[in-house]
């Protein structure tokens, strides 16, 4: 179908579905356009005058993309991004279609796009980005991807075919070894943590990448930050952690309230303050600083922007429900779960509800609950469960000798109301949901807000 | 009489991406709740350990690539594992480890990885991934779990399976069998983790190990398994 017609039809379909209040309006244009004119993604990509940056990895894509976008906007650029949409190929396409003007062209802009690992080959080949950023590779939804090595290979193919420059997490061996896929003329840069840090969990069993991806030789770690992120090498020396170009040199303060650290960018040592919690967000911010360095933007401006960055959708968001504050701590895999535990729950006294679903978007297999460091939760805490696999979570708590409040078969409303009954007004309640449970909770609380009895 | 069991967790670092550690947790806790001590020793690649001291041996699943190094190490322990199996030691091996307890694993690329041949079975990797909720029928009742493997395992005539699939693919999606059993060695593709939601099977494994070590052992006292059964019941009804 001709270019102009495709865009008009796609845009129209998007508007119509929005009118009917359908959530899929975000990806419908791309979904249609994909079929009508397969080369459209490449054509639109061609029009983007500024830099195209693709960000992928298991955890932190949304947050890091948001950070980079805010930095670029602060330096005066118009930035296309798929913040509200999906990170699959059709989501990216929908974002670009929405960015076209009345002449169906994209004006001058940069694009910072979050891309799902499996979608990266198609998107990178079509868009020919300047930079591909790979944040980390943890096991996540193994039932969707099969194996971690397979996912890495997909990303490698994307790097190879697009011939893009890459920015890689030096502390993740599987990510760092993606450098071998780069084009001869492409630039390879790394970010990583050099600081000493001993805030790790006692029961961290989430090292998902423990061997040299090429030879299978086991890795030895001199230092572990969390999961399999750290300083590593094989005994043979074939694989060794590369030196990062941008690094956290010192961590002065790190908690659920945010962090203060020293970041080394080239010859400069700058102070990075974040309100976003935990080590995992420090890694995200570090990646954003490294992107900024790749694009030769002002480092101090970058750090200033990052110091006021707020959480992305569904991550560390606080909602109100019947006078209580619900803090959402989204989990998607055991590494993320452990980071939530480490950052928020180790010394926590507040009630916590784990909402575990196993819909397609959450991952159908719940085995990963058994790798989460539940034994590190305070023994006398108040733990509740909900979601489709509440019983599995309750079982996990039982085998960790952690007490369970409430039932395993309560509805979301019943669970929340019971937690409200057991807390004082304005108290904080932690909600630790998987993805679709988070969506359901937001819809429910959003509806509930209008019926709040103060 | 103070009872205790030695549990050996093989390759906890290399074969650990499917939550199979939960099986060791289940074994340890169900002993502890009955006042029986459990000592867990982790044995990785290159670690020396006298396997004849083990009452229960456990090994989990990992990525196909990780199996090369594990396979080589496991081969060095063939004799002691065979002796342990013949003496009735209880073993539970899942997915990648289950494959290596057979004769060989043929990956999609690269050469065949030799197994220790405790099971008369072999596995060949295919492009098809068998993923989903599984229910199997065994001599010890129904087991519920989750499979995720590209290897198709074929049992030779005479090799007993762990059970027959009611839901799911099992060993190869064709022959209707799942897992394998030899003496007290149980191999399976079931994650979940397997043991937490299958308390009867777990207690059977524990009883086998306890009776072997303490011939006068008169049985485990029952525990309240309502939550375990609830979780299993939910899992059975989830879509494929």
Image (cartoon, coloured by chain):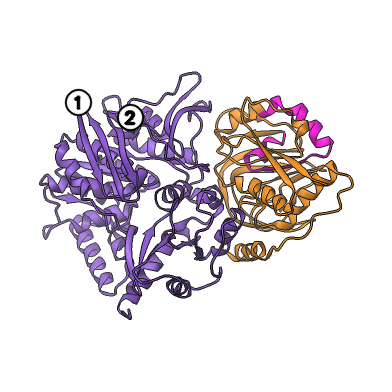
Q: Colour of chain B?
A: orange
Instruction: Tell me whether marks 1 and 2 sit on the same chain.
Output: yes
Q: Chain of mark 2?
A: A
Q: Is residue B237 magenta?
A: no
Say which quarter of the image contains residue A293: top left
Residue positioned 31% across, 51% down in the render: A257
Question: Circle 1 is placed at which residue position?
Answer: A267
Q: Is residue B101 magenta?
A: yes
- The dot on residue A182 is 2
Q: Specify the segment rendered in magenta.
A: B74-103
Q: Residues within 10 Å of mark 1 (few under 14, many from 20)?
A: few
Q: Is residue A120 visible?
A: yes
Q: Is residue B88 above or below residue A334?
A: above
Q: Colour of chain A?
A: purple
Instruction: Residue A135 in the image: state x and y as whole percent.
Output: 35, 40
Instruction: Residue B127 in the image: state x and y as whole percent.
Output: 54, 43
User: A423 or A115, which lies in front?
Assistant: A423
Q: Is residue A266 above or below residue B222?
A: above
């Amino acid at each position: 179908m001709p270019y102009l017609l495709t865009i008009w039809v796609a845009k129209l379909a998007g508007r119509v579905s929005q009118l009917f209040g359908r959530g899929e309006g975000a990806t419908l244009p791309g979904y249609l356009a994909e079929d009508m004119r397969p080369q459209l993604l490449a054509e639109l990509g061609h029009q983007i005058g500024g830099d195209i940056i693709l960000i992928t990895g298991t955890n932190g894509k949304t947050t890091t993309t948001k950070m980079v976008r805010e930095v670029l906007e602060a330096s005066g650029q118009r930035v296309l991004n798929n913040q509200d949409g999906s990170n699959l190929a059709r989501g990216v396409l929908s974002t670009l279609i929405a960015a076209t003007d009345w002449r169906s062209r994209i004006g001058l802009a940069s694009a910072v796009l979050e891309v799902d690992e499996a979608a990266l080959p198609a998107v990178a080949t079509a868009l020919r980005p300047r930079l591909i950023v790979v944040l980390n590779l943890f096991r996540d939804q193994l039932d969707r991807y099969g194996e971690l090595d397979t996912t890495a290979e997909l990303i490698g193919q994307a790097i190879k075919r697009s011939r893009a420059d890459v920015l890689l997490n030096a502390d993740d061996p599987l990510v760092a070894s993606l450098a071998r896929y780069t084009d001869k003329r492409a630039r390879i840069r790394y970010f990583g943590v050099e600081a000493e840090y001993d805030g790790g969990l006692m029961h961290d069993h989430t090292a998902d990448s423990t061997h040299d991806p090429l030879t299978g030789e086991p890795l030895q770690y001199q230092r572990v930050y969390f999961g399999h992120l750290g300083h590593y090498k094989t005994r043979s020396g074939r694989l060794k952690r590369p030196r990062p170009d941008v690094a956290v040199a010192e961590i002065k303060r790190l908690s659920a309230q945010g962090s203060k650290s020293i970041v080394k960018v080239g010859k400069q040592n700058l102070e990075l303050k974040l309100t976003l919690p935990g080590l995992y967000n420090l890694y995200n911010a570090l990646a954003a600083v490294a992107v900024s360095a790749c694009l030769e933007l002002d480092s101090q401006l970058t750090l200033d922007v990052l110091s006021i960055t707020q959480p992305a959708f569904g991550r560390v968001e606080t909602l109100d429900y019947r006078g209580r504050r619900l803090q959402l701590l989204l989990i998607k895999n055991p590494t993320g779960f452990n980071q939530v535990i480490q950052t928020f729950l180790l010394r926590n006294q507040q009630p916590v509800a784990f909402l575990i679903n196993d819909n397609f978007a959450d991952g159908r297999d719940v085995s990963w609950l058994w790798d989460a460091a539940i034994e590190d939760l305070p023994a006398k805490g108040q733990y509740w469960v909900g979601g489709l696999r509440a019983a599995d979570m309750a079982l996990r708590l039982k085998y960790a000798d952690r007490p369970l409040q409430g039932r395993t078969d309560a509805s979301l409303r019943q669970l929340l109301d019971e937690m409200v009954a057991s807390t004082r007004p304005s108290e904080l309640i932690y909600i630790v949901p998987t993805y679709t449970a988070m969506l359901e909770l937001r819809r429910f609380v959003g509806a509930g807000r209008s019926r709040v009895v103060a | 009489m103070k009872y205790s069991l030695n549990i050996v967790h093989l390759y906890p670092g290399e074969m650990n991406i499917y939550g199979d550690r939960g099986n060791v947790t289940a074994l340890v806790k169900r002993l502890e709740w009955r006042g029986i001590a459990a000592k867990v020793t982790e044995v990785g690649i290159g670690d020396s350990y006298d396997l004849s001291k083990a009452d229960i041996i456990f090994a989990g699943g990992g990525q196909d690539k990780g199996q090369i190094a594990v396979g080589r190490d496991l081969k060095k322990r063939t004799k002691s594992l065979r002796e342990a199996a013949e003496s009735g030691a209880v073993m539970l091996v899942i997915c990648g480890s289950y494959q290596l307890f057979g004769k060989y694993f043929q990956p999609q690329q690269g050469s065949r990885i030799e197994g220790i041949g405790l099971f008369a079975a072999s596995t060949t990797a295919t492009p098809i991934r068998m993923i989903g909720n599984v229910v199997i029928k065994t001599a010890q009742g129904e087991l519920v779990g989750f499979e995720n493997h590209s290897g198709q395992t074929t049992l030779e005539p005479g090799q007993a399976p762990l059970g027959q699939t009611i839901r799911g693919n099992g060993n190869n999606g064709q022959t209707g069998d799942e897992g394998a059993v030899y003496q007290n060695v149980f191999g399976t593709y079931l994650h979940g983790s397997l043991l937490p939601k299958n308390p009867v099977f777990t207690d059977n494994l524990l009883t086998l190990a306890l009776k072997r070590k303490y011939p006068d052992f008169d049985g485990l006292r029952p525990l309240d398994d309502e939550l375990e059964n609830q979780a299993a019941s939910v899992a059975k009804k989830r879509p494929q």
